[in-house]
Amino acid sequence: MRKTVTQQLLVTYSMDKEKDLPDNPGLVSLTIDTELDWPDSMRVALAYLASATSIFESIEKCNLFKGDIERYPNIDIISFISRWDRYLDKKADDWNILKYISASPKPVVKRPPFSICPRCEFLIWPRAMKRFSVGPDHLPEADSDWFERARQIYQEDPEPHYCLHCGQRFKYTDGLDYKASSSVQSIVSELGTMAKASQPTFEDITD
Ligand SMILES: [Zn+2]
């Protein structure tokens, strides 16, 4: 599945000098294939490293970086790293950067749909955790609606290949916490049961 992920880079500029200031300076958006571990998990990891490590000294420099990393699908990872290493690692250590972007797959933390990335702690199914407010009083929606939506979102993509925030790859065989005791199917039906169990009863409605 093709997706667009974004990462905000920090960039310094002065308003009076930068005439053609883009709407959102420093915003990088990558088109990635979520089914393809390599090289897209690496590109996501590189954008994450740049956002976490550096402040770009000018819009111009930042735009060069942006152009380089957004070039899809033709990005040569090795020359990209040597060109931009001082923005990707505090010591500009190419080997450190390579180790980071090619880290071995790790199990996700916590049971779905509450799981988070073991490296950056970003929610793996952020849409499933959204709770809408309803009605004129903006009360939180009923648990049943929320669980039901979480179930559908989880079921659409139960085993993402890698974190869309930091590029960490995930591991789903031997060792994945939630897989040890259950399957995707059992989590789906468990969420379905939770949705049903939290349907308001007749008494709740008439209260
Ligand atoms: Zn992550």
Image (spheres, helix red, strand yellow):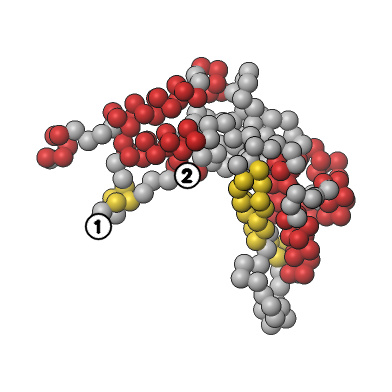
* Crowd rating for badge 2 (residues with CA inside 10 Å; few <14, some 14–19, many 20+): few
In the rendered view of the protein, which quadrant contains the C terminus?
Answer: top left
For image coordinates 59% across by 35% down, the residue present is 160
Question: What is the x, y in percent for residue 30?
Answer: 67, 53
* Mark 1 residue element: loop
Q: CA distance from mark 2 to mark 1?
A: 23 Å
* Mark 2 residue element: helix
For image coordinates 54% across by 41% down, the residue present is 123
Side (left or right) of 100 relative to 92: left
Q: Quadrant of residue 98?
A: top right
Q: Residue furthest bottom?
A: 16
Question: What is the x, y in percent for residue 83?
Answer: 86, 55
Depicted 64 relative to depicted 193: above or below: below
Q: Quadrant of residue 141?
A: top left
For image coordinates 86% across by 46% down, the residue present is 78
Q: Earlier in the sequence, mark 2 or mark 1?
A: 2
Camera-nearest residue between 170 and 40: 40
| Residue 127 tag number | 2
Q: Which residue is mark 1?
A: 136
For the question of whether residue 102 can be seen, the reply is yes
Question: Mark 1 belongs to which amino acid?
Answer: Pro
Question: Mark 2 belongs to which amino acid?
Answer: Arg
Side (left or right) of 160 relative to 129: right
| Residue 124 tag number | none
Q: Quadrant of residue 34?
A: top right
Camera-nearest residue between 149 and 129: 149
Question: What is the x, y in percent for residue 179?
Answer: 55, 21
